[in-house]
Amino acid sequence: MADTLLDIRDLKTWFATDDGMVRAVDGIDLHIDRSETVGVVGESGCGKTVTARSILKLIDMPPGRFEGGQILWQGRDLLPLGAAEMDKIRAREIAIVFQEPMTSLNPVYTVGAQIAEVLREHEKLTRRQAIDRAAEMLSLVNIPNAKARVHDYPHQFSGGMRQRVMIALALSCRPKLLIADEPTTALDVTIQAQILELMQEMKERFGMAIMLITHAMGVVAETCQRVTVMYAGKVVEEAPVDALFGNPRHPYTQGLIRSIPRVDRAATHKERLEAIPGTVPSLVDPPPGCRFARRCRFASDVCRQAMPPLKQVGPGHFVRCVL
Amino acid sequence: MASAVVLLAIVLAVLLGPLVWRVPINEIDFAAQLAGPSWAHPLGTDDLGQDILARLLYGGRISIAVGLCAMLVAAVVGVLVGAIAGMSRGSVDVVLMWLADLFLSLPQLPLLLLIIYLFRDALTNVFGSQGGIFVMVVAVIGGLRWMQVARLVRAQILSIREKEFIEAARALGASKIRQVVRHILPNAMGPVIVAGTIDVANAIIAESTLSFLGLGFPPDIPTWGRVLFDAKDTLDVAPHWALFSGAAIFLTVLSINFIGDGLRDALDPRRVL
Amino acid sequence: MSRQYLIRRLMIAIPSLLGISIVLFTVLALAPGDPFGELASNPAIPPEVAASLRAKFGLDDPVWTRYVHWLVAMLHGDWGFSFASRIDVDTLILQRLPTTLIVIGAAQLLAILVALPVGVLAGTRPYSLFDQIANTLAFIGFSLPTFFTGLLLILIFSVRLDWLPMVYRADLGATGWRWFVEEVKQSIMPVAVLGLFQGASLVRYVRSAVLDVVRLDYVTTARSKGIGERKVITRHVVRTALIPVVTLVALQMPVVFGGAIVTEQIFRVPGIGSLLISAMLSNDTPVVMAVTFVFACLVVLFNLIADILYGWLDPRIAYR
């Protein structure tokens, strides 16, 4: 496993709330190899975003806290690192793009200044050099007239353009891993495709690995090599993308795939789009068994008694289900 | 909670205190001039040998009454203006809100002083020296504090009148005034109560300030500010005089402010300021 | 910041100044009796002065004409004659105004220097021990009326400890370095009283503004850049939190002037606040009107400054 960049082992990120301890991420394992695109999918509230933010330790503590596990970055555990050490990893080794391009940029600084800030911090550039580099990055992400726009404020850009700025910002220090936390969810459909294409293009150019967090299975099918499916703070299935779509083993994964709207089928067979019944269970004191049991049509008493282990069902294909 | 207890104690003391502590407020005793606290005079005496405890208990009634009445004036004016502005929209709304902004940017204390300076004699002639000053102080303090309530009521009306139950009432043909009185005002009360509470504290400070500057109540009415005004020239020999009267104002204002803050948390948790 | 923005703010300041002048004039016009009745009975004032004053204020003209005349006279700096000080009112006010501005300015500076770090620390550690202490002290601070704090400070530092002079003296009878030291010593208490009162409410504003900003997305973005928590707070949190604070400070200005009047009166600081009180006590109407007008203008001026600061702090405003 010499090529493993990131190896998360049994990570637990919990939050203390008035209602009790919320086990947002409750012992997940996930690894990303060099130059690989890994999709992390699941419904809202399943722990995807908390996982992403845990990697860069962007969790507010309190109320959050790491209850256990390891986050190995090129073999080195990030969890015990101090703030100064962590700041050397952020942006330079691992960068992140958030869901909301409208609010992720500081409204009072020009986009150039915000990109330059990170360059000056990590590459010790002068103000002039940093602004020039920022302009280069903007033109790289296909923002027209980048030399002039580098002096514009975020509110002068549209949502899609701001997400391009965010990508430029994230890639400005050539990180080895880009975490994209639902980067297209807040955008128009046509813009979504452009942003995904841009990320693909950037990946070819810089060769970084991408952790793509999304709830859109279609996006995963198009862009990822491997997929991890999360449910209620746990990994329920992990597989190469072909295996996952060709032979989904977990009932939850099957449900997710069935809920993808398909033009060809809907038109001819008048089939109804299948939704998974119910919602994600409370993560405060979850029941002992499989967390999906309550919504699973195959659930039996075995499922409710103990959490099934992750078992291998094919090459690189793991599933947490007794079936 | 502690603040509610303190405030209750102060209010009870000024209401019932004079019935229990029957020392006259204006009994001059030159033998006990500027005496410190003793059994005969628990809070000491002033420069005329008058009992400070009795004066503070009596003056507290006036200070607190001014605070409450001024708040009522502010609340009534504010609710009226806010309701009219919120219901009418259009140019009436614009003018009223411009007026509220204008009043917010008026230098309150200088204006307060100016009005009292110009109108004092006329009102004294009509209502007598004590009543005239009281009416004027209450009217002016209240009249300069309605803006916040007006804005709150207007904002509430604008947000609530779009909600369904108002629509329902409108469909049933309820008149505008009826809508405001029956449906909108009860909903707008939370923030108004908070603002009103804080206004009581502000009005007490305003009255004390006037009296402290020698422009409020006359010397024979010992409001807290007036007592402090009289005390300030003998700080070196009789600090207790100023300390007790100042502490009375401070404790009252502090407990009211704390209660207002608590009410705000309870009634409107989303607002921080 | 664009020039149009500046001009627009200036244009907004004019109607509010006019509005304030109308309110002032209305109060004067509604005042019962003759505000210059004092003139006739005061033997110190020559009849011709009284007559010219009556003519200038046009006491027999219709209200609107009187208002316009009055406003034009005020704007020209033609504020009449002080009966008590026996000099022109504008001269008198110009003598006193710098002192008031210095005291208020120094107090604002003190308030900001105290409130900004305290408010930021409290806002970034909400509900911590520090936050609770700061919050309680802030509450006590703005519940303490300035006249009481002033007396307390005099009691402690002048009467008991004898460190600082009890009253402010315009004429110190010293020069050079000694004059400066004396000047600073006698300014400490007035500035502290006013500054701490202001600072107390400022702490709460800053805290709640910081609290609002720290949970915004772009602060997380800033953290993900690896620039260190200090820079995240100073560049990204404080910088934007200042925007609402500026507005709130501007709204507070009328209260600050009220506090300044009280403070000047306690410490006998020879500014326009104490001038107002002494003019009232000696029935010096032209001075009373002029000082009130000056205070009103100062409020408008500070609101204008706040607007300009606001446009400078928030690029979104200036471009609109």
Image (tube, rainbow, N blue to C red):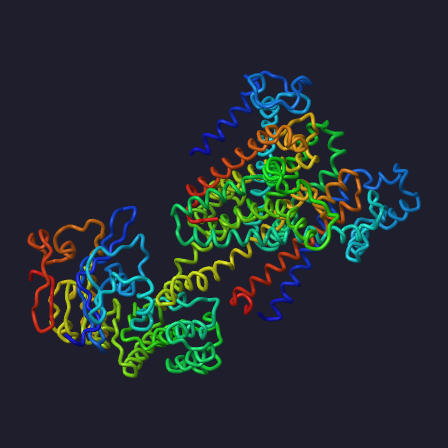
Residue found at x 14% / y 71%? A239
User: Residue C81: x and y, percent?
Assistant: 84, 48
Vertical position of residue A32 compared to residue B249: above or below: below
**Would residue C131 be found to the left or right of residue A265 on screen?**
right
Of the pair A181 and A244, the residue shown nearer to us:
A181
Of the pair A80 and A117, the residue shown nearer to us:
A80
Residue B111 in view here: no
Of the pair B97 and A322, the residue shown nearer to us:
A322
**Would residue C174 be found to the left or right of residue B269 on screen?**
right
For the C terminus of chain A, the quadrant is bottom left
User: Residue C82: x and y, percent?
Assistant: 82, 46
Residue found at x 54% / y 54%? C112
How many numbered marks appear? 0
For the N terminus of chain A, the quadrant is bottom left
**Would residue A221 be found to the left or right of residue A131 on screen?**
left
User: Residue C216: x and y, percent?
Assistant: 40, 60
